[in-house]
Each structure stands twice: as structure tokens, then as C-alpha cells.
Image (tube, rainbow, N blue to C red):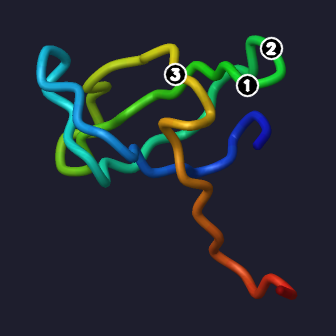
Amino acid sequence: MKTLDTVALLRSIPEKKLVKGQVGTIVEKLDRDTYEVEFLDTKTGLTLGVETLSGSDLFLLHFEVVNA
């Protein structure tokens, strides 16, 4: 995964009010498997949170054809 990739959260983070499946954008790759991800409220455009997460907490979403 890389900066500006769109990802989905694989686990809920109740203390941050983020739920499993919430979609976010990687805003920074901190190291090999650690990312800062921004989550937005799509209705208001306001940031719900920016969280530091492991790659194992994220699922990369694809919006174009990917050869399997």
C-alpha cells in the first residue's frame, strides 16, 4: 500500500468512533507496515480522524481492473 491509496478498516475502533468497513485514505506511509489513514464524513467533508494503523488493520480497495 502507498500514499493516497483508498483502504477499508478491517476492525472497529470504538474509542475513535470508527467502524469495521469504514473507508479512508492513506495520507502517509510511516514505515514498512505502518500508515496514517484519514477518515472523512462524506456528507460534511469533515475529518472523522487520522489514525496510525498497521497494514493488517487495512484492506486495499481497487477502483479499476486488476489482473489477478
Mark 1 or 3, nearer chain start: 1
Residue 25 at x, y percent in the picture: 54, 39
| Mark 3, other Cα within 10 Å: few <14 / some 14–19 / many ≥20 | some
Residue 40 at x, y percent in the picture: 33, 37
Query: Dot 3: what SS?
Result: strand
Q: Quadrant of the N terminus?
A: top right
Q: Name the side, left or right, on which 2 lies relative to 7.
A: right
Which labelled disc corresponds to residue 53? 3
| Amino acid at pointer 1 | Asp
| Residue at 80% from the left image edge and 14% from the top image edge | 31
Query: Dot 1: what SS?
Result: loop
Q: Which of 28 and 35 is in front in this view?
A: 35
| Residues at circles 2 and 3 in contact by the CB criterion of under 8 Å | no
Q: How far apart are marks 1 and 2 (CA)?
A: 6 Å
| Mark 2, other Cα within 10 Å: few <14 / some 14–19 / many ≥20 | few
Residue 46 at x, y percent in the picture: 26, 29
Q: How far apart are marks 2 and 3 (CA)?
A: 11 Å
Q: Mark 1 points at which residue?
A: 33
| Residue at 52% from the left image edge and 43% from the top image edge | 58
| Residue at 72% from the left image edge and 81% from the top image edge | 64
Q: Name the side, left or right, on which 13 lies relative to 1.
A: left
Q: Distance between the residues labelled 1 and 3?
A: 8 Å
| Residues at circles 1 and 2 in contact by the CB criterion of under 8 Å | yes
Which labelled disc corresponds to residue 17? none
Q: Name the side, left or right, on which 14 lies relative to 65.
A: left
Q: Mark 2 points at which residue?
A: 31
Q: Quadrant of the C terminus?
A: bottom right
